[in-house]
Amino acid sequence: MFIINCPYCGARDQTEFSCHGEAHIARPEETEKLTDEQWGDYIFFRQNPKGLHYERWVHSHGCRRWFNALRNTVTDEIFATYKVGEARPVLPEQNAGEAPS
Amino acid sequence: MSQKCRLDSGGLIDRSKKLHFTFDGRPYTGYAGDTLASAMLANGVRLLGRSFKYHRPRGLIAAGSEEPNALVQLEKGAYTEPNTRATCIELYDGLVATSQNRWPSLDFDVGAVNSAVSRFLPAGFYYKTFMWPASMWMTYEKFIRKAAGLGVSPTESDPDNYHSCYAHCDVLIVGGGPAGLAAALTAAVPGARVTLLDEQPQLGGSTLGVEVNEEFQRWKEQTIAALTDNPDVTLLTRTTATGYFDYNYITALEKVTDHLGPGNGGDKPRQRFWKIRAKQVVIAAGAIERPLVFADNDRPGVMLANAVDTYINRYGVLPGRDIVVFTNNNSAYDTALNAAQHGATVTVVDTRSEVAGTLTDQLSARNIRLFKGHAVSSVQGSKGVASVRVMELSADGKSLQGQAWQIDCSIVANSGGWTPSVHLFSQSGGKLNYDQSIEAFVPDMTRAKVINPNISAGACNGVFDTGGCLAEGMKAGMSASAACDYVASEITLPSVEVDGMSDIAAIWLVPTVHPVGEGPAKHFHDFQNDVTAADIHLAAREGYVSVEHLKRYTTTGMATDQGKTSNLNALAIMAEIRGAQIPEVGTTTFRPPFTPLTFGAVGGQESGELFIQERKTAMHASHVANGAIFEDVGDWKRPWYFPQGGEDMHAAVQRETLAVRQSVGMLDASTLGKIDIQGEDAAEFLEMIYTNNWKKLAVGSCRYGLMLNEHGMIFDDGVTTRLADDHFHMTTTTGGAARVMNWLEEWLQTEWPHMNVFCTSVTEQWAVAAINGPQARALMESVSDIDVSADAFPFMTMRTGTVCGIPARVYRISFTGEIAYEINVPARYGKQLWDKLTEAGEAFDLCQYGTEAMHVLRAEKGFIIVGQDTDGTVTPADMDMDWIVSKTKKDFLGKRSFMRSDTRRDGRPQLVGLLTEDPQEVLPEGAHIVGELRDAPPMPTIGHVTSSYMSPNVGRSIALAVLQDGLNKKGETVKLRLMDGKVIEAVVADPVFFDEKGERVRG
Amino acid sequence: MKAYSLFSLVRNSMSYHRNWQRAWRSPDPKKHYDVVIIGGGGHGLATAYYLATQCGISNVAVLEKGWLGGGNTGRNTTIVRSNYLLDASAGMYEHAVKLWEGLSQELNYNVMFSQRGLLHLAHSVHDMQEIGRRGNAIYLNGIDSEFLTPEQVKEMLPIINLDCRYPVMGGLLQRRGGTARHDAVAWGYARGADAAGVDIIQNCEVTGVRVEHNKVVGVDTSRGYIGAGKVGSVAAGHSSVIAEMAGFKLPLECYPLQALVSEPIKPIIDCVVMSNGIHVYVSQSDKGELVVGSGSDAYNSYSQRGSFDLIEHTVGPLCELFPIFSRLRMLRQWAGIVDVTIDRSPILSKTPVENLYFNCGWGTGGFKATPGSGHAFAHSIAAGEMNSIAAPFSIDRFNSGALIDEGAAAAVAH
């Protein structure tokens, strides 16, 4: 039972929120030009990392705003929550080479 | 019956309050303050139950919640409760308890035959047999099931109610013993909000059962008083912390009125379930004494040493006059001295050959005989200990030697050391270390889970003496309150002498004269599940060596006590067999709950009336008055049909369906999802959400739209109306309303935040009466100031005005193919609108109709219902709805998926109509069309019926179906094969059965 | 392998059970195997067993990072059924049920497959339409399937509250469905595979997948490099991690799936009850515990911990459908990690890397498929091509769109 820091409302109980999977997957432009593989990759394939995960949450029983979080999927530690459109945070211990685009 | 084992004085019981109770129908008495266990013991009853597998006679082992044996069926009838630990039942007057898992009686149990044949029933025997013949397994199993289980379930609904609540605090303290009390006081003094839980009815923890000095007693009383008076402190007794979840979320069960007896709780709940969020947690949960594993150590009368102490000190019960104390550490010496002081004849058998300090002198002073370096080699007496034999241990502790001393006794008080209660720490995700000095696992607080800040203090941290517990508690209270930004300082603690509990010399398996498992005796470590040391040997021999395999193969630790007294012994015995260190075998995973948790307390508030709230429309009361039969649609109660006179459903639906097409009908359409969409980019937004075009839709006009997910599959539909350039009113399916709202928000917020669009759910704000039928316009004319002439208010437009004097938005849209007006009024006028229309409608033969007639009417027109005629696997093309998919738009959600090979392949299932050969034959919904009719399954199927009705307007049965390549099969005859063998033939038809040209709706 | 029997049990009891063999050996890994199976759960062990006993490939290793059967094999609610709507699913799960029906005898290990019947309840017109469609589909696929009226439901389950929040309108019964003893399945396959020559190597974690010229050649492990002609990954919740080692992504996400049991009581429920309308999934084990399936938390996790609110939302409905359970007690709750695909159907597939095969994505329904999955996967690995039962579950379906979406098709959880 997490405590999640909604960027708009502050810390709230997990039961107020729902999670919607990996964040920072932009819907491709000009979808008609994509191959089936590229389109399949966009709708079905996910990182599913054992470790740090950038993910989308919505404060469904609160302000109803969507936002992103950085959470460790093994320890469930939430390192950051941030608004949609904000740059994704990078932890000091994350390898700079892995810094996400 | 007299309480023959009750001492003349002493204990925390109220001897002025005599309580009557029965066990297996026999009457007994006890006192207020007793548990069922202490009262039974006071009455000299040692035999309280039968074990799970061998049906061995069993008695009390412990005095607390770790008790594995003494499980009873508490109370009768609706209040009955199986598997209740006698040690946790506070005695009340009139209590009725019954023994379990025996037949015909506890004293004479036929099941005990299992004990006689136990050599054929080693761990896992059932994996090796009951396989022949294969067909007999279910028969064998019937007997196995009957033999298994413990108590019996109630067969009536629970008459009690439960309460659950949330709480927040700075510091949560689990355990009200010396460490917990010291922590609470230390944290509370500087102002921290403290919650303290303890499973006992009184605070004090272990000191309720063990005497400490007077200074401590005074301090305890003052501390409890100070905490009680502090408004920032919540003290919860009879409350067990059951689970430790992430971000310091602790669940706890408070037994509010259980101790008053059934039906005596007044307006209070039986139990209350707490969900507590704490900034810091101090775990002061104490420790549990371990039994020694020796031959026939399960005989009634073999008890934990500490339990004997507790029964003497707390309950004033001396369990037996002749007591053998059997130990491998110092703590049981207190028991010996205490028992002797209360008049028992005591003999101490210590497996250690050296005993340090003054203990031996203290024994001598009381004339207690001490066997050093000896062990109990056997226990005599089947339904109760009669005597023990004592022999000298070899130097390595693996065998016995010399003369066997027989000692008559009724109680064997044994101690194999103490196991810190690390359950909560472990549940919190913390890791354990093995501490050889106490031969047990302790929390490694440097390896606590970051998100669950907690501190273990006192016995659960491996510190067993009261002075040490107090000091640790204080320290924990300081750290925890400091972590919550309070300036904490030391408090004054009472001085207590060091108890010296430790000095343990482990002996995990006490030998007997036979090799383990080869004599008549059994060495139990898990009493309730009847698991013995021999079973561990067998598991090791067969390769089930890891702790998880050991547990699962032998079932050790899987009983209702979850291995509280047995886990470490099992691990250690396995480690010895493997020649490994105990941590190498593994630590067991401690799973919540700590003690079994009443289902009613966890979920009782979410069942019955509060399970899922019924949603009712503004017109609901009118529907009830009009005799509607309701259908559950999502959480909504919708009128299904309105029977008149003695009509059955079929007659009512036929009448309603006809009336709509002959005069006018009225449907409560309030449950349809409604979303108000505003903003300058609203049209742009809808272009992406729907498959068709929206930019050019005129203000005041309505349009039907289909929504797809990104897989290209239909997921909702509805009519959306343009109220202004930048303002739309969207409708959705009843069941899809919330899903669509979330869908819109998701795209707006995450993908297109640049769009200036705002969505507001207005489902509950508007009540909707839909009037349909040739007389709908006339009815509207009679009640509305809107010009409803065909030219002024054409099909698929919206007008505002008043209806029955109520301000309304009226949408001329139709789900029946008739002239129709969907009258939307603010919800608070809904009932008034309905009632006035009903009244005004009399002149036009208005008929109220329900969802079933609605379904028939729309099916006559071939209108699909998303979720009935579609599932999540159909595209617009599959529904023959290509007309609604824009060919010109560059993009919309799901569009790209049409290009995938499977989505554009030929022969996909497609929507068609079906007309049975026999017009009176109504196809069952779900019936399948076979590709090839065979005598018996399997046979290939090529489609199925999605909707099927008797249509009074068409004058025959009609059906919608999805059929592979159906659009190319119109006119063909197909066969449907039912489960009863019946074959029905039907012709594939167009799905529009009535008014094919659609003239009526525009009239 | 010395056979288990009543006779062997009696004979061994005469020698105080001193002479039982190890159920499986504990060998050191060899340098090279024809096939390496990653993952010692039920599916992996079954794959190895069928490779060795039916496909003539016994130079096989099963690498398990912990203890065999320690993952979802030992964490599920032990339900076995094949009452699926879609042909591909019916093919797989019915294949499994048929193998289940003789499994105890085949393995000479009692897996206690108990066909006590599995009853799906319908609580709305929509549910009735759903079971109507599914019941017919199951029947025409040659699988047993019966509709029950509410009265028949009550007869089968006298303790049910038919008039619950969404009154019971009917039921769909598969009499051949039921439960099995989950641990025994892993142990039985392990013992059988071991006897057929398979090396089961526990505490051996795969740390890398070696690929040369787009062909798998072996795996790095915590016990050194092990060469392999072919590699089958059956790593359930850790499949994404293995795929990443081999350089590709899978359409999988991992979630915690929770379950709980009550204290043991005397027999009170004789069949398996599943209600999607009320959200109750319950059966009673031979030991007497009510085994209750909860749900999966909707966030990615490898922590084997779920959120407690799911347990509350499981127990509430349980008390709604069976009000007499209110005074019973929850003994234990736990979570497993389930790997779920977008269509909630599994993946049995070749991969972008030659000779590397994946069997994963079983989501919440893997246990029941264990024999069928292992059997189909073994034969497919041996042939180098997915067989007819496995073929629809190819990873290619996520590009072609040929999903096997039972949930979407039935609009229910499955």
Image (spheres, coloured by chain):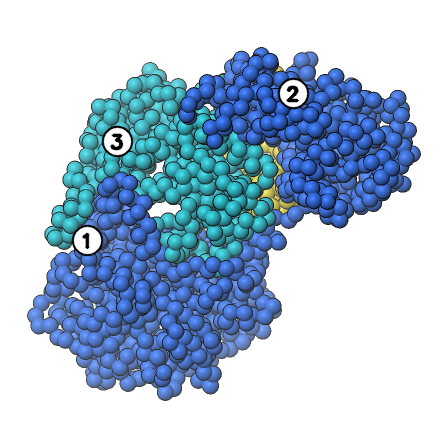
Circle number at residue B120: 1
SS for callout 2? loop
Q: Which numbered mark, 2 or 1, is in the foreground of this view?
A: 2
For marks 3 and 2, give the CA distance.
Answer: 53 Å
Task: From the image, state the color of chain A.
Answer: yellow
Residue B879 in view of the camera: no
Task: From the image, state the color of chain B.
Answer: blue
Please indicate whether residue B84 sits to the left or right of residue C184 in the image. Answer: right
User: Mark 1 is on which residue type?
Assistant: Phe
- State which chain disc 3 sits on: C
Height in image: B77 above or below B650?
below
Badge 2 density bin: few <14, some 14–19, many ≥20, Cα 10 Å: many
Return the x and y of residue B355 as percentages of the image width and height: 20, 72
List the residue tagged with mark 3. C49
Q: Nearer the viewer, residue C224 or B162?
A: B162
Return the x and y of residue B20 as percentages of the image width and height: 44, 79
Quadrant into which the C terminus of chain B falls = top right
Q: Which numbered mark, 1 or 3, is in the foreground of this view?
A: 1
For marks 2 and 1, give the CA distance.
Answer: 69 Å
List the residue tagged with mark 2. B991
Q: Residue at the location (27% across, 63% down)?
A: B110
SS for callout 3? helix
Badge 1 density bin: few <14, some 14–19, many ≥20, Cα 10 Å: some
